[in-house]
Amino acid sequence: MQRELKQELISLWIVFLQEIGMPKFIIRRAMGITPLAMHILTERAKMTRALWLKVMWRDNWVCYICHEGRRPNDPFEAEHKIPLFRFGYTTLENLGCAHKSCNRKKGTKLIEQQILYPFLKQTKAIFVFLFLAGLLLLWIVFQMKLRLG
Ligand SMILES: [Zn+2]
């Protein structure tokens, strides 16, 4: 669960960097991730509650894998027909309404985890580095103020 939250935060961070105009390859180099991991993280961040609802209403709340309706204790998920790890996109066409259990049977989540896990440790190190760099910068500014004042 905690790992999922981390991935979410990193996804948002990557999307933010893209929004402010940083080229993709620089983000990839800086975070030490593969193009595939980058693709998974950015596409996952595009999944919103509104998009989920759109998919559900389009598919009339029927699972596209087992063709059954709602079941208790088995929530619907918007599933990627072409999985993210096969460079599928988070678009209305590529999403399908599916039970959580039907989705798990496809087993793509597991593969995604294996792809994403190695670099998460690395990004942690980068965040620590950025924090330390920030502290150093603050210290330098403070020193300069003392000298000037
Ligand atoms: Zn199903």
Image (cartoon, helix red, strand yellow):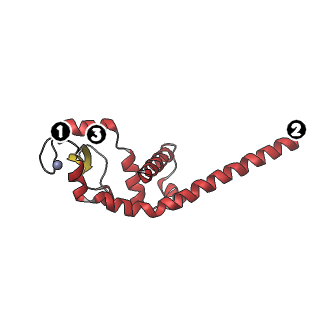
Closer to the N terminus: mark 1 or mark 3? Answer: 3
Say which amino acid is labelled 2.
Gly
Residue 57: x percent and y percent?
A: 20, 35
- Circle 3 sits on which residue? 52
Give the numbered dot on residue 61.
Answer: 1
Q: Is residue 4 left or right of residue 27?
A: left
> Residue 14: x, y in percent?
48, 49
User: Split into 4 quadrants, where in the image is the C terminus?
Assistant: top right
The dot on residue 132 is none
Q: Position of residue 4 (x, y in %)?
A: 41, 51
Q: Amino acid at mark 3?
A: Trp
Q: Secondary structure at mark 2?
A: loop
C-alpha gap between disc 2 and disc 1:
68 Å
User: Which residue reaches farthest left?
Assistant: 67
Question: Can residue 110 be spotted in the picture?
Answer: yes
Q: Is residue 53 above or below residue 121?
A: above
Residue placed most toward the observer, 49 or 19? 49
Query: For the residue carrying disc 2, how many other residues have a C-alpha within 10 Å: few (<14), some (14-19), or many (20+)?
Result: few
Residues at marks 1 and 3, CA–CA distance in whole angstroms: 11 Å
Q: Viewer-nearest of labels 3 and 2? A: 3
SS assignment at label 3: helix
Pointer 2: what residue?
149
Image coordinates for residue 84, horizontal then vertical, percent: 32, 55
Q: SS of the residue at dot 1?
A: loop
Left or right, residue 1 beside residue 126: left
User: Amino acid type of disc 1?
Assistant: Trp
Q: Residue at x 52, y 49 (%)?
A: 22
Q: Quadrant of residue 52?
A: top left
